[in-house]
Structure formats: structure tokens, C-alpha cells
Image (cartoon, grey):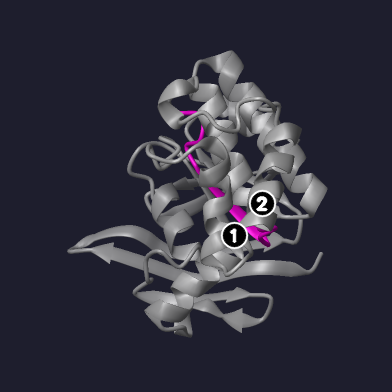
Amino acid sequence: MTSLLSGRGLVKRYGDAYALAGVDIDIAAGEVIAIVGPSGSGKTSLLHVLAGILKSDEGTITLGGQRVDQLSETKRSELRRTEFGFVFQSGMLVAELTAEENVALPLLLGGRDRGMAIATARTWLGRLGLAGKETRRPGELSGGEAQRVAIARAIAHRPKVIFADEPTGALDTKTGHATIGALVDAARETGAAVIVVTHDREIAAMMPRTVAIRDGRIEQPVAVQ
């Protein structure tokens, strides 16, 4: 299977402590993968390094053959806006904007026409079961609904990779499972790869592939359902 996103020899230090201690990982186009491990194991650091949010101290990262680790901060920021999508535990929606405006925001930042961006946002909100709630603000939505808005925002510009950092951490079990299902279904529709960081083994069990990390090292390279 051809790799879309690869990390080789990834090292990230915080003082004398190693968040990553030489990680090798490959993610194929359209692949859905869970990264699991205890608190402090390095799983969020790995996600942030792969996404170009953090720079590794050592190692290489490639996306479709392009060296992400060699890009300037400006170019990495552009890459995150165009090729990557993000879903965080808290959703990180803009409180002052409506659901459709939150979803349209990355498209507008990418130079898309406002009318087209809003239309795309409404389409994705509808697909994610939020038809009729397009003009509600985050404070008027349930936790699960807000996370679906975040999923729509992450996928509306059709990124190559979606990074989800504990996306169900603030949700009850039933809502969390439904949210993950919505994320995976949406990604499959567009062909995006999905990388989910989670401490929840039930969530990880829903993924076709699981990678476990402990003390900054891959503990079990591949565990397939």
C-alpha cells in the first residue's frame, strides 16, 4: 500500500524528556487509524508533529513525497489550511459565528467565494444530520452537534488528511461513538485519511488499524481488527 503521509525517526524533546523517541509511521491515502496510549505517552505530540503544528527535533515527514519538515512556518500553515483538517476535543468553534459560518471559514480563508463556501457548508451540515441548525451558534448546540460542526469544518475543503485529537473526550459514550462514525463516514466519502488520537479503547476498536505508543515509542506497529 502506497504511503500518503510518512514519518521517519521522529524525535521531539521537551528539555531532557522525550515526547517522541524515534517514531516511524506510515499512513496510506484513505486509511483510518487510531493512535492509542496512556497520558504522556507521546500520542498528541506525534499527531502535532505529523500535522506540522510542532517541528520535530529530528526525523523527516513527507506528504505525497513533499518534505513537510523542511517547509517554512508560512508554508506549513498553508499546508494545514489546504491539505489537512482538524477536529479537537473541545471543537474549537468560533462562538460568534453560526454553524454554517464556522464550516465555511476554512474555505473563505482559502479564497473561495462566500456564496459557494456557505452552500458547501450547508451541504456538509445536512449530510452530518444538522439540517435546520445551520444558523445556530455553538452555544445553541449540544456537545455532539458541535463536534459534527467541527467535522464538517474539517472536511468541507476536502483535505488529504484529517487529524482528530481526542474528538470524543468531552462526549458521553453513545454520542462519542456516533460522532466517530460520522467522522469516518464523511472521510470515506471524500477519500481523506483519518488519524484519531484517543485513550478510549472502544473508540480505537472501531478503527481498521490501531497504533499503540508508550514512552515516545511505537509499542505495537499494527493491530488490525
Q: Is residue 124 above or below residue 215?
A: above
Q: Which circle, 1 or 2, is nearer the viewer? A: 1
Q: Report helix, strand or loop for mark 1.
A: helix
Write down the residue under mark 1. Answer: 107
Q: Earlier in the sequence, mark 1 or mark 2?
A: 1
Residue 201 placement (x, y as % from top left): 56, 27
Task: Determine the image quadrant of residue 65.
Answer: bottom right
Q: Is residue 136 magenta?
A: no
> How many badges with numbers are in the image?
2
Task: Using the image, tell me which numbered label, if any, was put on residue 156.
Answer: 2
Q: Is residue 160 above or below residue 88?
A: below
Query: Magenta-highlighted stretch: main secondary structure?
Result: loop
Q: Is residue 86 left or right of residue 4?
A: left
Segment tinted magenta in the rendering: 157-169
- Marks 1,2: beta carbons within 8 A: yes
Q: Is residue 221 visible?
A: no
Residue nearer the viewer, 173 or 7: 173
Write the residue at 46% across / 83% down: 71
Residue at horizontal 66 percent and vertical 60 percent from the top: 159
Would you say 12 lies left or right of 170 here? left
Q: CA distance from mark 1 to mark 2?
A: 8 Å
What residue is shown at x 47% (from left), y 37% (from top)?
Answer: 166
Q: Nearer the viewer, residue 1 or 141?
A: 141
Q: Amino acid at mark 2?
A: Ala
The kind of residue tagged 1 is Leu
Crowd rating for badge 2 (residues with CA inside 10 Å; few <14, some 14–19, many 20+):
many
- In the displayed orientation, state which residue is furthest to the left: 15
